[in-house]
Image (cartoon, rainbow, N blue to C red):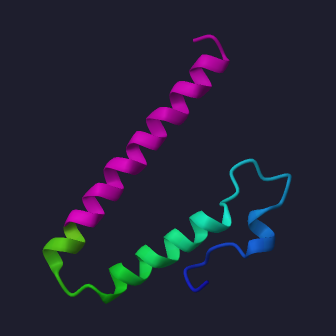
Amino acid sequence: MPYGLPSARQAKRPMDPIALTIGQMFEIEKFSREIDSSKDVDELQSIAKQLLVAWKQQQAASAWVIRQQHGL
C-alpha cells in the first residue's frame, strides 16, 4: 500500500497492541485515494478539519484511559 501503511503481515504482529486490521488498512487506502483525486480545496479543508478533530478526540480518549488505569 503506497501510503507507508504496514503490510498485512506487519498489521497482525501479536506484540503490537495497536496494529491495524486488514479492513482498516483497506479503508485508509480507499480514503487516501479519494483525497488524492479531489481537486476541491473546500472539500480537502473540510476533510483536514474532520481529521484534526478525530485525532484530538483520540488523544483525549487515550489520556482518559491512562488516567483511569492509574486511578487519577
Q: Looking at the magenta stretch, what is its main secondary structure? A: helix
On the image, the x and y values in percent for residue 11 come to: 74, 65
Where the C terminus falls, by quadrant?
A: top right
On the image, the x and y values in percent for residue 57 come to: 40, 40
Q: Is residue 63 above or below residue 23?
A: above
- Tell whether 71 sits left or right of 59: right
Span of residues in magenta: 46-72
On the image, the x and y values in percent for residue 21 come to: 67, 61
Q: Is residue 54 above or below residue 38?
A: above
Magenta stretch holds residue 50? yes
Q: Residue furthest right?
A: 14
Q: Residue at x 47, y 40 (%)?
A: 59
Q: Residue furthest front?
A: 23
Q: Residue furthest top?
A: 71
- Tell whether 55 sits left or right of 10: left
Q: Residue at x 35, y 81 (%)?
A: 34
Where the N terminus falls, by quadrant?
A: bottom right
Q: Residue at x 58, y 20 (%)?
A: 67
Magenta stretch holds residue 2? no
On the image, the x and y values in percent for residue 54 come to: 38, 49
Q: Residue at x 34, y 79 (%)?
A: 35
- Place residue 14 in its image quadrant: bottom right
Q: Is residue 16 above or below residue 56?
A: below
Q: Nearer the viewer, residue 24 or 41?
A: 24
Q: How many marks?
A: 0
Q: Nearer the viewer, residue 51 or 70?
A: 51
- Tell whether 45 sits left or right of 50: left
- Place residue 6 in its image quadrant: bottom right
- Place residue 70 in its image quadrant: top right
